[in-house]
Amino acid sequence: MTVNSQTIQSMSVLEAMRGRKSVRRFRPDPVPREMVRTILDAAARAPSGTNTQPWNVYVVEGAAKARVSNAVIQASEAGETNPSYAYAPEKWFEPYLSRRRKIGYDLYALLGITKDDWPRRKEQHNRNFEFFGAPVGLFFTMDRRLNHGSWIDMGIFIGYVMLAARGLGLETCPQAAWQRHSDAVHDALDIPQEQILFCGMSLGHPDWDAPENALQTDRETVDKFTIFLTD
Ligand SMILES: Cc1cc2nc3c(=O)[nH]c(=O)nc-3n(C[C@H](O)[C@H](O)[C@H](O)COP(=O)(O)O)c2cc1C
């Protein structure tokens, strides 16, 4: 694969999948525009029902990135929330509740944040809105008139973006946190209201020395979530 006149040896698909993790601290090193284009070009090969390709992507860097960060931090400070959609059920229940709690506690433990240290928890949450220090932010949107089927397509596309990024030696963090402040994101980036904001994503070079990037999340085994039927 050629990016910026450099030939990059891309990793195997399984390696890209198995090694992917959400990175929550990035180095400030820039990501060339050409790399972002290569990632999006590869991700655009994602399948979608009847090839509808419902995805739109807003890539933010520099002043645009600062603008959306500031707008959302301000909205968050003011307690203004206007989610694009309900990500969570009204009340979490098992086994999802425990899984959710575990990743929160594990992340805070790595950062030395105690359970009831609300100011530091909030500070860490707000790191979402700084793209965790990444030089590039992405926002994924779709025409609101499309229906649930297209949400499947969006999820696959977003997954492809994360894997393609790994293929180029970059890492990501998908972030639904942004959609809770959708008005601020729409306003800051002039995203038409006809588009629904799915999530944001941080993209860049990981800082592997950062404690938060040591987080290794669990997964259930295949036999826990799969039923093989033969007759
Ligand atoms: C749709 C989606 C939204 C997410 N939103 C956030 C977010 O707002 N902030 C964050 O730090 N992580 C976010 N994550 C990352 C998840 O916490 C993470 O994928 C999960 O804990 C599994 O860990 P791993 O990605 O390291 O394997 C999100 C992941 C997905 C798929």
Image (tube, helix red, strand yellow):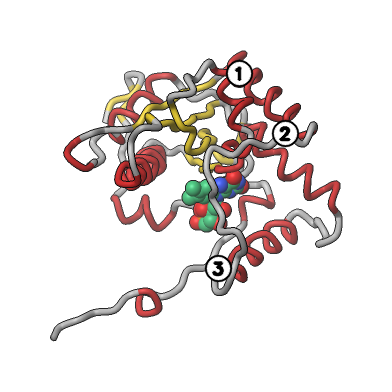
Q: Of helix, strand and loop, which one carries label 3? A: helix
The spot of residue 70 in percent (x, y) is 71, 23
Q: Amino acid at mark 1?
A: Ala
Tell me, for residue 96, which label it has, or none.
Answer: 3
Tell me, for residue 88, which label it has, or none.
Answer: none
Q: Is residue 103 visible?
A: yes
Q: Amino acid at mark 2?
A: Glu
Q: Mark 1 or mark 2: which comes first in sequence?
A: 2
Circles 2 and 3 in contact, beta carbons < 8 Å = no
Residue carrying label 1: 188
Judging depth in this view, the residue of 210 and 163 nearest the camera is 163
Going 56% across and 40% down the picture, which residue do you hit?
A: 206
Going 78% across and 50% down the picture, which residue do you hit?
A: 121
Cα gap from disc 1 to disc 3, whole angstroms: 34 Å
Q: Of helix, strand and loop, which one carries label 1? A: helix
The spot of residue 86 in percent (x, y) is 54, 48
Circles 1 and 2 in contact, beta carbons < 8 Å = no
Cα gap from disc 1 to disc 2, whole angstroms: 15 Å
Q: Amino acid at mark 3?
A: Tyr
Residue carrying label 2: 80
